[in-house]
Image: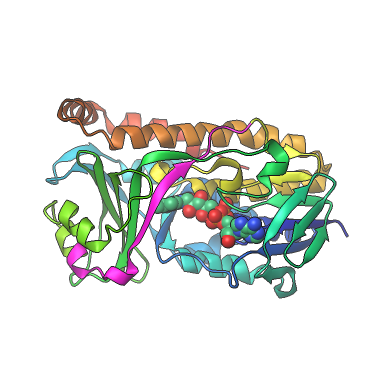
């Protein structure tokens, strides 16, 4: 039986393990952490990702544990509409996006990978194009080596040498809260160099996310800073922040990757953030990792020519990295004149234009 050695047991690595298993391959997943776990936050899965999950046979289970997302659009910090989204048109044309807790997504993926195939507490130190991975417990060999080891991938070095992630210029907070009053809508609001968004999870908890311009590596700045920055924004943001617990707040500087020349070298292929880490402005990082998983396993099983994976995946994912970066730059504008111009332009843009611009991202069929 052919075998894939997968470095990394995040969303990308586990989805890839499932995809190879479905093609009748043996898999070995090597994960550095001592347990497979995700951060305490929500995640949006767009229709393209749901199609990838359907291809893995998991679409129904995911929908059961997720909540349909109905984006209303973008507001300013006072709650005035900048851009209205036509959620019905989006649903009809592309299908509905969903929101779920990351831990639930990971649990579903984990439960589909044979127990004996997942090895935790193992750190890869080197991947070789002849199909070997050197790691903290020895060496593993496979017909295909998959680098699913995230933005600071070790496997990537064997494909394209050292590559430095790029700092976006802004940091992100995430926190899941239990609001005192139920919330039904979701939304995102843009200020000057700051944004705040929220979406409802299936159990009615609310996943909040926020960004602010900040030098990389700035220490501190947990819930108190979120409250200082966003506590006077429109409802329900102050109430959400009042309900938040300091210990649940996650803060991460946001990076993406410059475009790689290739995602493959001989027997090695890169998936997910190892290949195309992107800023989360389109909510597509994990969605693209799920697409990668489906395409890579199919190409490997068909004829093993990994160059076809590169040709199918690189242009698409690099287009999405670029778009995400651009949306972030516009969303984070901070000079009063630029913010005024942006907000005026957004108010003048019809929902149909926004709706059409999503097509190249959401139209993926596999
Ligand atoms: C604030 C924020 C919000 C986001 N929101 C969304 C969203 O709504 N929708 C969406 O689709 N995406 C979103 N994303 C992006 C998404 O989280 C990532 O794209 C996705 O998690 C990448 O998965 P991955 O498996 O490729 O990498 P990772 O999740 O980074 O997993 C890599 C795994 O490899 C392991 N590893 C690393 N090095 C080694 C090694 N040497 N040996 C063994 N194991 C190793 C790590 O421990 C880890 O488990 C968001 C990202 C951020 C930062």
Residue 56 seen in the current view: no
Query: Which corner quadrant holds the N terminus?
Result: bottom right
Residue in view at x 14 percent, y 46 percent: 79
Q: Position of residue 42 (x, y in %)?
A: 40, 61
Front residue of this view, candidates 90 and 237: 237
Is 172 situated above or below 18?
above
Is 55 situated above or below 111?
above
Tell me how the rendering is colored. rainbow
Task: Quadrant for residue 159, please give it.
Answer: top right
State the residue lying farthest toward the right: 1
Taking the image as shown, residue 22 lies to the left or right of residue 332, namely right
Q: Is residue 256 magenta?
A: yes
Q: Position of residue 7 (x, y in %)?
A: 68, 57
Is 11 situated above or below 177?
above
Residue in view at x 31 percent, y 32 percent: 330
Query: Which corner quadrant holds the C terminus?
Result: top right
Number of marks in the image? 0
Residue 117 seen in the current view: yes
Q: Position of residue 142 (x, y in %)?
A: 83, 55
Taking the image as shown, residue 76 lies to the left or right of residue 16, namely left
Taking the image as shown, residue 349 lies to the left or right of residue 364, namely left
Q: Is residue 67 magenta?
A: no
Residue in view at x 18 percent, y 72 percent: 180
Q: Position of residue 133 (x, y in %)?
A: 77, 55
Front residue of this view, candidates 305 and 275: 275
Where does the magenta region start and end?
241-260
């Amino acid at each position: 039986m052919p075998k894939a050695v997968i470095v990394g047991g995040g969303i990308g690595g586990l989805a890839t393990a499932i995809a190879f298993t479905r093609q009748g391959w043996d898999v070995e997943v090597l994960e550095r952490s001592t347990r497979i776990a995700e951060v305490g936050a929500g995640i949006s899965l767009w229709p393209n990702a749901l199609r990838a999950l359907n291809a893995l046979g998991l679409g129904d289970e995911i929908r059961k544990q997720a909540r349909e997302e109905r984006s209303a659009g973008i507001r300013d910090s006072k709650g005035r509409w900048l851009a209205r989204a036509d959620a019905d048109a989006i649903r009809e044309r592309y299908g509905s996006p969903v929101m779920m807790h990351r831990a639930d997504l990971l649990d579903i993926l984990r439960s589909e990978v044979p127990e004996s195939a997942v090895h935790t507490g193992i750190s890869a130190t080197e991947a070789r194009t002849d199909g070997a991975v050197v790691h903290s417990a020895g060496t593993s060999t496979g017909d295909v080596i998959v680098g699913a080891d995230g933005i600071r991938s070790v496997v990537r070095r064997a494909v394209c040498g050292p590559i430095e992630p790029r700092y976006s210029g802004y940091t992100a907070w995430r926190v899941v809260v239990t609001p005192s009053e139920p919330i039904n809508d979701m939304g995102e609001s843009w200020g000057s160099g700051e944004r705040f968004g929220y979406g409802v999870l299936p159990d009615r908890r609310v996943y909040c996310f926020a960004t602010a311009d900040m030098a990389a590596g700035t220490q501190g700045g947990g819930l108190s800073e979120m409250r200082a920055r966003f506590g006077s924004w429109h409802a329900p943001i102050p109430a959400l922040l009042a309900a938040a617990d300091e210990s649940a707040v996650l803060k991460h500087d946001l990076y993406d990757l410059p475009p790689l020349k290739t995602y493959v070298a001989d027997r090695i292929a890169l998936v997910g953030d190892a290949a195309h880490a992107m800023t989360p402005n389109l909510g597509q990082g994990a969605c693209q990792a799920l697409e990668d998983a489906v395409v890579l396993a199919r190409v490997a099983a068909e004829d093993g020519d990994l160059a076809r994976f590169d040709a199918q995946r690189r242009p698409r994912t690099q287009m999405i990295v670029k778009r995400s970066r651009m949306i972030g730059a516009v969303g984070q504008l901070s000079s009063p004149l630029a913010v005024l111009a942006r907000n005026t332009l957004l108010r003048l843009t019809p929902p149909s234009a926004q709706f059409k611009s999503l097509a190249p991202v959401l139209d993926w069929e596999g």
